[in-house]
Image (cartoon, rainbow, N blue to C red):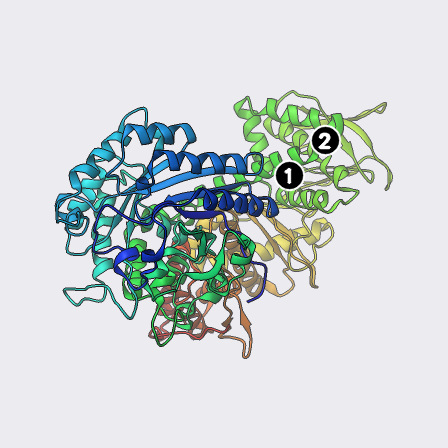
Amino acid sequence: MTGPAVPFREIVLKVHSRCDLACDHCYVYEHADQSWRTRPKAVSDHVISRTAQRLAEHAKTHALPSVSVILHGGEPLLAGPSRLRRVCEEFGSALAGVAELDLRIHTNGLQLSPRYLDLFDEFGVRVGISLDGDRAANDRHRRFADGRSSHPLVLRAVELLRQERYRHLNLGLLCTIDIENDPHAVLDALVALEPPLIDFLLPHATWEDPPPRPSGKPTAYADWLLAVFDRWQEQGRPVPVRIFSSVLSTLSGGPSLTESLGLAPTDLVVVETDGQLEQVDSLKSAYEGAAATGFDVFSHSFDEVAAHPGVRARQLGLAGVSETCRRCPVVRSCGGGLYTHRYSSAGGFDNPSVYCADLEALVGGIARGAAASAVSPVLTDRRELAAAQYDLTRTLLAGLHQALDGRAGDRWEQAWELAGALEETDEGAEGLERVLTHPYTRTWLLDVLEGLRAGRQDAVGQALRLPAYVAAAAVRAGLDVVVPAGYQDGRLLLPTLGELRIGAPGTSGAVRVRRSGDGFTVREEGGAERRIPFAEADGPGWLPVRHLCRAGAPSVALDDVDPYRDCFGAPAAPRLGPAGAAAWSETVAGAWALLTEAVPAYTADAAGSLTTLTPLRPGRNARRPHGYGAAGLSTAGGVRETARALLRELRRTRLRALLDVTDLYALDGAWTYPLPWERNSTVPFSGLLAETYERVGLLALGPDGGEEVLRALDTLDAAAEPTAGGTLLLNSLRAEAEGALGASGKKLLVNTPGHERVR
């Protein structure tokens, strides 16, 4: 096992080892490990003190900002108020000035009273209560030893926590699932109590002692949970439910929210009443001594426990699950299930969960049931994508302002204030949006931010292009505003407008830019004013951004002057002369006409987002990010080859734009996949998706390569990496591919039943 151990951020402190209920599903008393019989009933002062010291040492060593201490049992309230006060005081004192302390207690609630809650209020101890639903459900397992119901007393405890003075202490309800109970009745009973959280727990089981399935159905627990999920959805998700929130999070590319699901490493250690340090408590369900480490708080540090092989095994993420799980498409969400639930005497913990079929069905059911709400609208609405891209650019600009922290001086601050003033009018806001959504504005921002991070000396100077961006926005807005700006290397670049030669190469200086009639003026300090008309033709020292204006083609900028346009896979061409620009435009217009005939709906949509084309010359170039709406093209291959290149570039820039603002996959690089069109080549999921996304589009120009594209889609569909949004994208790609191949008359492949995954 390589890499450093994950530090513990959470400890479970057993403050009492006995319980006042006789729940027949309890892993502490009713399962394989019976070590509770030899433990002291209550934790001693010495154990409390040493545990607090050990935790403080651990937090200090690893610079942990916060740690959680969960008071547990048995039934922790049996320890009594005095001992619980001692625990709170010891941990509060030890961690003062070291890390923030989050104290919690998990209880059956029978002993809960204002006396306890006043104590918990004093120390900020939040309270979680175990309740299995309505009375019929709760009494199925949670009874006293003499068979009496615990339900009325638990409800009394919950009602205490609902009082205004204690409501801030309410951590929520823990409910152990029994599939014999009515799922709707259970959910309704819990929701009626208005908890801040409901945590449904699968009953602890292993392959040696599997969970009861009265119907014999392998997905009985998933069916029960999905019935709860559907009702929860119908009710408008009135209360957070941890297991559902966790699956929804991972489906969207986010983290797991519970130890029982997902691939996050464990960061929890248990301290028994005698000071023994153990692994997660649920391991007691596996076999006698399964949770033991041989360490204690008197002789061992938490770092020693963190290095224990059993603990490390639960910190390996994807590498820590079985081979079967690593090949499963829902592994990101289920994470192989709770570690305990994987145990068998033959294979140890190197197995799928005993709930494997349930977890697969649960993740799939939630994915289907929440598909619409889980997917970002940017995937289906071009305007939403454009708006998200604009928000991203504004966020980057704000980040640059913060990163500069005054280093760019008065010129930056003045431009920043002018930009704010522009936004106060409709015309100014529109002009600023036109300039900030220019695709190469993004390239400038990212280049400067990277330069600042790397300590590049020219980064602050590059940031001082902001005044020119503001000047271009004011000119576009038609506002009578004088904007101070600077020029470098003898040239003033006004993004989206053009480039003005002011001085000799290598010179720099200050100018003032102002809108004037059907153009604008530029006055150099101490020099004459120059008037620049809005025209497509070059003027003395003036190189305007021209536009592609041909019948049937969209009106887009032909930008061959912006210094940040050199961001494509081939080098940007130098400024085209009038004849060269005309010929280039004619070829592009012909290519657009060909695409309009082949994929009319796609080109109509693309026309609404494509804003900028940049001529390229032959050669290879390092790609750099740019904003949404740009494409770089070489027309050397003629109309048809330009059409293919344009279609690829349009699809490439759209996929990149989607990835900028939404998560389409997670764990990229955990697996590699074969490229169907290149023998002996493997790539991560991102590489296969990018190439497939482009090739699906090219099928509209001919069916060649269609079989390989469908095989690639089969592989992507069966992969674990796609989020809910990624799955929607893959579905749309398959429909697009099959539609193109069907229209071409090419026989479609039947989906292959599996795929090859290379680790």
Q: Amino acid at mark 2?
A: Ile
Mark seen at residue 496: 1
Q: Residue furthest top?
A: 480
- Tag 2, which secondary structure? strand
Q: Residues within 10 Å of mark 1 (few under 14, many from 20)?
A: many
Q: Give the left or right position of residue 751, taking residue 699 as reference.
A: left
The percent coordinates of residue 487 (x first, y second) are 78, 34
* Distance from the alpha carbon under mark 1 to that under mark 2: 14 Å
Residue placed under numbered mark 2 in the picture: 532
Q: How many marks?
A: 2
Q: Give the left or right position of residue 390, taking residue 618 as reference.
A: left
Q: Is residue 3 above or below residue 751?
A: above
Visible in this render: residue 689?
yes
Q: Give the left or right position of residue 7, taking residue 172 as reference.
A: right
Which sits in the foreground, 599 or 706?
706
Q: Give the left or right position of residue 151, taking residue 359 as reference.
A: left
The percent coordinates of residue 673 (x first, y second) are 49, 71
Q: Amino acid at mark 1?
A: Thr
- Tag 1, which secondary structure? loop
- Residue at 34% x, 48% y: name it: 41
Q: Is residue 722 above or below residue 490?
A: below
Q: Residues within 10 Å of mark 2 (few under 14, many from 20)?
A: some
Quadrant in the rendering for residue 53: top right
Visible in this render: residue 253?
no
Quadrant in the rendering for residue 163: top left
- Residue at 15% x, 48% y: name it: 137
Which sits in the foreground, 738 or 667?
667
